[in-house]
Image (tube, helix red, strand yellow):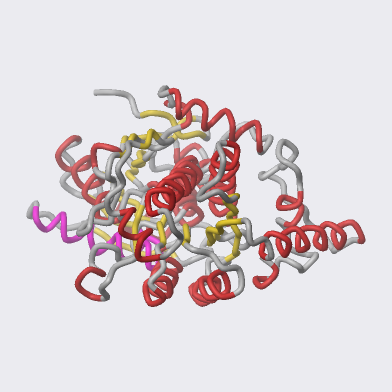
Amino acid sequence: MCAHGACGPTRAYLALLAAPPGTRDTAAPPVGPPTEVHTMIALHACLALLASAADPAAVKLGGIYPLTGSYAATGVAMRNGAHLAADEINAAGGVLGKKLVVVDADDASKPEQGAQAVKDLLDKEGAVALIGPANTGVAAAVAKAANDRRVPIVVSNAVGNKVNELFQEAPPNYVFRLAASEALQAQMMVTEACAARGRRKPAILHDETAHGNGGRAKLEALLKERQLAPVYQGGVKAGEQEATAQVQAARAAGADVILLFALAREGAAVTRGLEKLGWKAEVIGTSSLSSSDFTKAAGPFGEGTSLPQTVIEAGATQPVQVKFFESYRKTYATAAVEPAPGAAQSYDAVHLLARALKQAGTTAPDKVKAALENLKDTYDGATAEYFQPWSADDHEAVTPAAVVWGVLHDGKVAPAPSR
């Protein structure tokens, strides 16, 4: 979307946006100084986006994700999943007799940029609903902006922003989530550590973002319910490369398991600290660690890390899941879908929004919201089979039954061995 800097020829992902399906390489965006070719690609990308913006025969959804910056790997996967869904919907006839278009905006993992993206997508692009973003801090700003405008948003990756709390704090609530929430994941982590494994001396390591701080607080509260307390808790600063001091403190405190509530890069800093100390600690993390920023950087001491997942590529057996992963790999010319939850959840979010639009028979935001709260048909998605995933008083679609344990093995997320 040109309003968010897509016209700058130095943007690393312009070539991805401009490349035809089947030729995109999401793992290797262009780098280096702008060239004449970059400039032409940028120009064509912007012209295509402007053409879609001017097309009255299109129904538009706005996609907000980090396409640049530290968490671009997750943002690109989300974007790709959303566009894959739109392609399928359009091949089946579109929505309301029109083509469905997902207009992308780069939040660069910055809350203020995400909030501005909401304004631009609604006012300049005419988006009728939104999906994304990836990160909790950005999601809090984006969700508030969307809710203030009374436009539905399906949060398709961030786990810690308020959703059901908004029924009381900021009604009417237009914020929905299709991801395993912070509360759900914290509960799973504590149950796995204390009930399934019998650990009594957990250490909490977390990143110092809204994601990590919110998760830490929930972990502490859940441990307190079990009459336990962390033997150590420590924060990892954004961009910190090696959390050796925090790991050393956890070890010195006698920790028998590490509860790691962190984004991918900061999570990898913890496993590098483990490697430096030679400590093969048990690590239980969050879905954020399925990003290649963790799986490819965690090293040998990240091997065996447990993490909750709404879908695992290596464990996909249902026909719709197999089809999704095959289509994604073929369309985007990649060997693997990483992170799989971010891509699949955004894919399902677009499909569910399309169903709500069809059911509502209009793009009016209040009618689309009402349809989302009472979807009539079952949707067999990439992450789960959904029948009325949301209701008028519950906007969290993902339940504990829909989340499974994955484990990091040889740089990939695999299904955890059954006990």
Point 30% across, 60% down: residue: 215
Query: Does residue 77 appear to the left or right of 263 in the view shown?
Result: right
- 183 vs 331, nearest the viewer: 331
- 29 vs 324, nearest the viewer: 324
Q: Position of residue 203 (x, y in %)?
A: 27, 54
* Vertical order, 146 against 372 (above or below): below
* Vertical order, 222 against 200 (above or below): below
Point 49% across, 74% down: residue: 115
Q: Position of residue 11 (x, y in %)?
A: 73, 63
- 414 vs 177, nearest the viewer: 177
- The quadrant of the rendering that contains the N terminus is bottom right
> Is residue 408 among what the camera can see?
yes
Q: Residue furthest right?
A: 36
Numbered circles on residues, count: 0
Point 34% across, 65% down: residue: 174
Q: Position of residue 124 (x, y in %)?
A: 61, 73
Q: Magenta stretch containing residue 262, yes or no?
A: no
Q: Magenta stretch containing residue 217, yes or no?
A: yes
Query: Does residue 31 appear to the left or right of 173 in the view shown?
Result: right
Point 44% across, 43% down: residue: 348
Q: Position of residue 146 (x, y in %)?
A: 42, 71
**Residue extent of the magenta highlight:** 206-225
Per the picture, the main secondary structure of the magenta-coloured stretch is helix
* Vertical order, 218 against 409 (above or below): below
> Is residue 185 among what the camera can see?
no
Residue 52 location, quadrant: bottom right
- The quadrant of the rendering that contains the C terminus is top left
